[in-house]
Image (cartoon, rainbow, N blue to C red):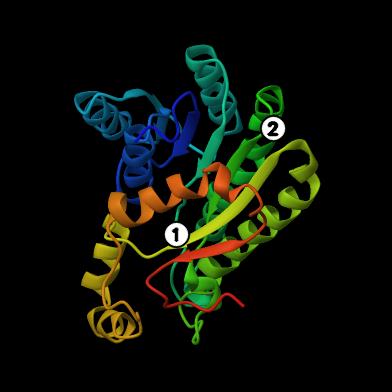
Amino acid sequence: MNRLAGKVALITGAGQGVGQGIAFAMAAAGASVVVAGRTLEKVQRTATEIARRGGEALATACDVKSASDLSRVVDECVLRFGGIDILVNNAQEVPLGPLLDVDDEAFLAGFESGPLASFRLMKLVHPHMIGRGGGTIFNLASSAGVRWDMTGYGAYGAVKQATRVLTRAAAAEWGAQGIRVLTIAPHAESPGLKWWIENNPDEAAAFFKTIPLGRVGKLEEDIGRAVVALCAPEMAYLTGATIPLDGGQANFA
């Protein structure tokens, strides 16, 4: 079903994991997709798979910590497809560990790749969305920001919570212009989750028991298709919210 036919989506961190799952789902729904990522070979594989399935995609290398890279990617997207309707700010470097073990460089990388990159891209796509009558922006957050025990997750949770605040502000400021801004907080079978399970097996086992649906989400089927659904006209009154795609585990109240 081509629910996104005629739409153009820009997705960062689309070479693997959640970003790739969203890219696959959006392309399957008819969107033209720009898949951006730090490693060109990875996003090229994503674009190749989309093309194999009959979709349309452009792969481009992008370090989201680079303002010039972000500007170039937006320009490439507009040049190739004529505009931007959907932005997914997914790429993020993760500063994990107790606060005393997280150095300034790691925390800064988390901030620059997360809220700062999202801030920059939101502003870059804004005029292009205005030119197309509006659009939808998705910023990625994490339940790490609302954990029952923040030990080891303070720096990561801080940058993700900053992103949620940007979502609320942009939703308030740009709603009258037809731009909706949402935060999604997924649990999915990503490489990052696999790494976390391998390095924290006991914590992971306890964590998974708290997911009411009893499983971790599938990248395309559970996360990607949910994001597609949130782009639908039926969702036009929803903005500024944080939407947990996590089987009911987190409490963002």
For the point 45% across and 53% down, the residue is 93
Ranked by sequence position, the earlier of labels 1 and 2 is: 1
> Which class describes the residues within 10 Å of circle 2: few (<14), some (14-19), or many (20+)?
some
Which kind of residue does numbered mark 2 sit on? His
Q: Determine whether 251 is above or below 5 in the image.
A: below
Residue 191 sits in quarter = bottom left
* Left/right of residue 213 with respect to residue 149 in the rendered view: left
Q: CA distance from mark 1 to mark 2?
A: 27 Å
Which kind of residue does numbered mark 1 sit on? Val
x and y percentages locating residue 117 in the rendered image:
59, 43
- Would residue 91 be visible to someone looking at this image? no
Disc number at residue 144? none
Secondary structure, mark 1, is loop
Disc number at residue 126? 2
Check if mark 1's residue and mark 2's residue have beta carbons within 8 Å.
Answer: no
Q: Which is more toward the observer, 41 or 222?
A: 222
Q: Image quadrant for the N terminus?
A: top left
Q: Where does label 1 land, which residue? A: 94
Which of the two marks, 1 or 2, is nearer to us in this view?
Answer: 2
x and y percentages locating residue 88 in the rendered image:
50, 42
Q: Determine whether 80 is above or below 191 in the image.
A: above
For the point 25% across and 72% down, the residue is 197
x and y percentages locating residue 240 in the rendered image:
67, 57
Residue 120 sits in quarter = top right
For the point 55% across and 51% down, the residue is 139
